[in-house]
Amino acid sequence: MEETVGSGMSVLVGLLIMAAIGAVAGFLAHAVMGGGAGLIGNIVLGIVGAVVAGYALPAIGLSVGGGIVGAIVSATIGAIIVLAILRLVDRA
């Protein structure tokens, strides 16, 4: 396999975009649910939320569209689900 010259740069750009979407989604989820976790916490929450939404939304037949806006909306929905579950577990 040949490695292209720009492949390392495209991976970095992809990671930065994923972190930015995660940060926005985590911030929005905390705005809806209350509380806050700082920048790193928002990024992690948003990325975990995106994974959860990636499985949960298609399973119930929901599609939020494509592109950056669709990714942010989907990740935010997933992050809200994750926050709700974490709060239920915290109460127990």
Image: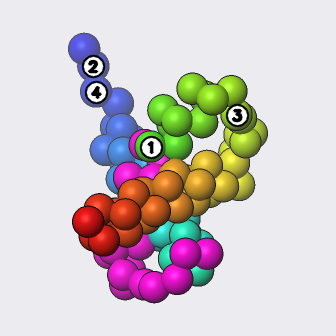
Relative vertical location of residue 57 with respect to residue 72 in this rendering, above or below:
above
Please identify the dominant SS of the magenta region: helix
Residue 41 falls in image quadrant = bottom left
| 53 left or right, relative to 71 | left
Whole-percent x and y of residue 39?
A: 38, 80
Of tags 3 and 2, the one toward the viewer is 3
Q: Which residue position is annotated with label 1?
A: 52
Residue 3, disc: 4
Q: Which residues are magenta?
A: 32-51
**Counting residues from the N terminus, which is met first, the one under dot 4 or under dot 3?**
4
Whole-percent x and y of residue 32?
A: 61, 75
At horizontal 52% and vertical 83% (from top left) the residue drawn is 34
At horizontal 43% and vertical 43% (from top left) the residue drawn is 51
Q: How would you rate the neighbour count of disc 3 (Cα within 10 Å): few for under 14, some for 14-19, many for 20 or more?
A: few
- The residues bearing labels 4 and 1 have C-alpha atoms spaced at a distance of 32 Å
Q: Nearer the viewer, residue 28 or 91?
A: 91
* Disc 3 element: loop
Q: How would you rate the neighbour count of disc 4 (Cα within 10 Å): few for under 14, some for 14-19, many for 20 or more?
A: few
Residue 3 falls in image quadrant = top left
Of tags 4 and 1, the one toward the viewer is 1
Whole-percent x and y of residue 5?
A: 34, 37
Whole-percent x and y of residue 81?
A: 49, 55
**Counting residues from the N terminus, which is met first, the one under dot 4 or under dot 1?**
4
Q: Which residue position is annotated with label 2?
A: 2
Q: Are marks 2 and 4 in contact (CB under 8 Å)?
A: yes
Q: Are marks 3 and 1 in contact (CB under 8 Å)?
A: no
User: What is the total number of numbered labels drawn onto the structure image?
Assistant: 4
Question: Within the magenta stretch, is there residue 39?
Answer: yes
- The residues bearing labels 3 and 1 have C-alpha atoms spaced at a distance of 13 Å
